[in-house]
Amino acid sequence: MERRVTSPRIRRSLAVCFLVLGTGCADSIVRILAPENEPQIVNTAEKFQFIATDLRNVNDRVSTVWANSAPKAKLIHDSFIHHGYGVLVITDGAGVTVDSTLLELNLEAETRVGVPGNWTLTLILAGARGRVNFTLTPEP
């Protein structure tokens, strides 16, 4: 014999549970970097800067090329990712990785020495919430 849940109290409890579960999942929408994040790129011989704001569960991989005339670069991080993570991978003109680091707040670093030329910058975001802001400048 099949039993049914007929108690109004149990039905209300189940409804509240489903409502809470549904609300919890509503913020788990996977997003890519979009215009709402106001991405800004400055790509000149003097510097490369990338800024994106209001990241909300962003999962994306973005690559761009920066012409670096020097053998290394100074890297200034001013990112704030309070959930998830962001990684910046930098390869030199020969395709060798000269830096791979998590995006941080208030961090200055230098890449390893590499081959001048077209450097590839790959930004990887996974479940990222917050903002991304980093700057590269040529270092002789």
Image (cartoon, rainbow, N blue to C red):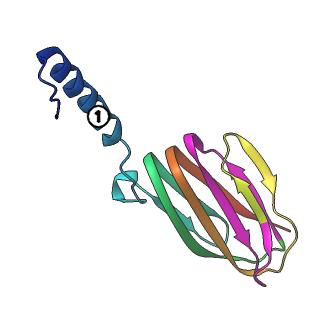
**Which amino acid lies under the numbered mark 1 shown in the image of this protein?**
Thr
Q: Which one is nearer the viewer's eye here, 120 or 76?
A: 120
Query: Percent from the top left, x then y, of residue 19?
Result: 24, 30
Query: Percent from the top left, x then y, of residue 90?
Result: 71, 68
Q: Residue at x 78, y 63 (%)?
A: 99
Q: Quadrant of residue 121?
A: bottom right
Q: Quadrant of residue 72?
A: bottom right
Q: Quadrant of residue 135?
A: bottom right
Query: Percent from the top left, x then y, of residue 37?
Result: 40, 52
Taking 105 as reference, is 126 above or below it? Answer: below
Looking at the rendered structure, the secondary structure element under dot 1 is: helix
Which residue in the structure is indicated by mark 1? 23
Taking 117 as reference, is 130 above or below it? Answer: above
Specify the quadrant that holds the N terminus: top left
**Farthest residue in the top direction?**
9
- Assess whether residue 87 is covered by the magenta stretch: yes
Q: How many marks?
A: 1
Q: Which one is nearer the viewer's eye here, 126 or 132?
A: 126
Q: Residue at x 53, y 68 (%)?
A: 62
Horizontal relation, residue 124 to residue 67: left or right: left
Residue count near mark 1 (Cα–Cα under 10 Å), binned few <14, some 14–19, many ≥20:
few
Q: Which one is nearer the viewer's eye here, 19 or 55?
A: 19
- Assess whether residue 26 is covered by the magenta stretch: no
Q: Residue at x 85, y 75 (%)?
A: 114
Horizontal relation, residue 65 to residue 129: left or right: right
Taking 108 as reference, is 87 above or below it? Answer: below
Q: Residue at x 23, y 26 (%)?
A: 14
Query: Percent from the top left, x then y, of residue 65?
Result: 61, 77
Find the magenta span and give its range: 72-98
Horizontal relation, residue 134 to residue 41: left or right: right
Q: Main secondary structure of the magenta part?
A: strand
